[in-house]
Amino acid sequence: MPENSTAVAMGLFDGVHFGHRSVIKRAVEIAEENIGIAPAVFTFETASVTSKGDNGVEYLLSRELKHELIGRLGVKYIYSPDFMNFKNLTAEEFVELVLCDKLMARYVICGEDFRFGKNASGNVEILDKLCRKRGITVIIVPPVTEDSGVRISSTMIRNLVKEGRISEANKLMGARFQFRLPVMYGHQIGRTLDFPTINQYLKKRQVMPKYGVYASVAEFMGRVYPAVTNIGMKPTVANTEVPVAESYIVGFDGDLYGETVKISLIDFIRPEVKFDSLEQLKNQIAQDVKKATEAR
């Protein structure tokens, strides 16, 4: 936790999209402008957040990747507790316990729709009132809009991912939609088709891209490779019970079982299809690889 006073950017920051970055970058700028102030972020883990009685918010980025992207923006401290441990704090308790005691905040930066406290009872007006009493300056950052003038939001990006509109989602995020997961054992059918693949099981609370084939990039062991990734249930060869990301890594020939590989999706190529034969599947994979390498 901080040893100095901080400028704290607050938000869920799922996706770390351009709207989120404007809030975080403002905190970094304030810290740079004020001696003795460190840039910090307060955020909840997206997978722990529940809302409106549903099963919770589907996350765009895992905790690890989310923190990695935030750190690249120049943030020194990230405080990211489990939502369930804080959801019953009143607005005043949140300001006192989190902003004052934990983060030693001198500046608080957030978007105009920021909510906090039990049942999201606190808004930016309440935040400003509570912080003023404690000598904390609140700065509200206006929303960032896309070319059409529509406000960029995580909900918008989630919907684009679910529709397979990955290139559009990537544009709004300012980074590629990605996941970093261990490689699991599969049926090894790809090897018999001359296209050996890796299998990664997608997490339950991860927002699920539209089933289909994507141009992608694989990163592991400090190297980057073009790839083609099928996301779905593998209807031709397996019919799995949970969604699988199956990737053919162009130019790599080796064993990655047990390794952790980051896959970044670039563009949607085609929907998932059940083929009548493995030969048809093999021919289609060859076409997919050609399109994927052209899309990079």
Image: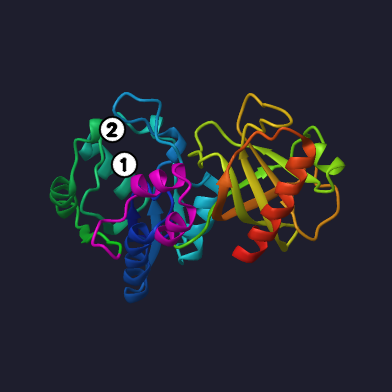
Judge whether 206 appears above or below 65 on screen: above
Quarter of the rendering containing residue 4: bottom left
Judge whether 242 appears above or below 20 on screen: above
Q: Nearer the viewer, mark 1 or mark 2?
A: 2
Which label belongs to residue 89? 2
Q: Which residue is mark 1?
A: 97
Q: Is 249 or 3 nearer to us in this picture?
A: 249
Q: Is residue 166 magenta?
A: yes
Q: Is 103 or 59 nearer to us in this picture?
A: 59
Circle 1/circle 2 CB separation < 8 Å: yes
Judge whether 194 appears above or below 173 on screen: above
The three-letter code of the residue at mark 2 reads Leu
Report how far apart the C-alphas of labels 1 and 2 lie in the structure. Answer: 9 Å
Q: Is residue 187 magenta?
A: no
Residue at 64 percent of width and 43 percent of height: 230
Judge whether 52 appears above or below 30 on screen: above
Is residue 199 rendered to the left or right of residue 207? Answer: right
Q: Is 52 or 244 nearer to us in this picture?
A: 244
Residue at 44 percent of width and 33 percent of height: 48
Q: Position of residue 272 (x, y in %)?
A: 59, 39
Q: Which residues are magenta?
A: 147-173
Residue 136 visible in this rendered orientation of the protein? yes
Magenta stretch secondary structure, dominant: helix
Q: Position of residue 151 (x, y in %)?
A: 26, 56
Residue at 31 percent of width and 55 percent of height: 152
N-term mark: 1 or 2: 2
Which label belongs to residue 273? none
Element under disc 1: helix
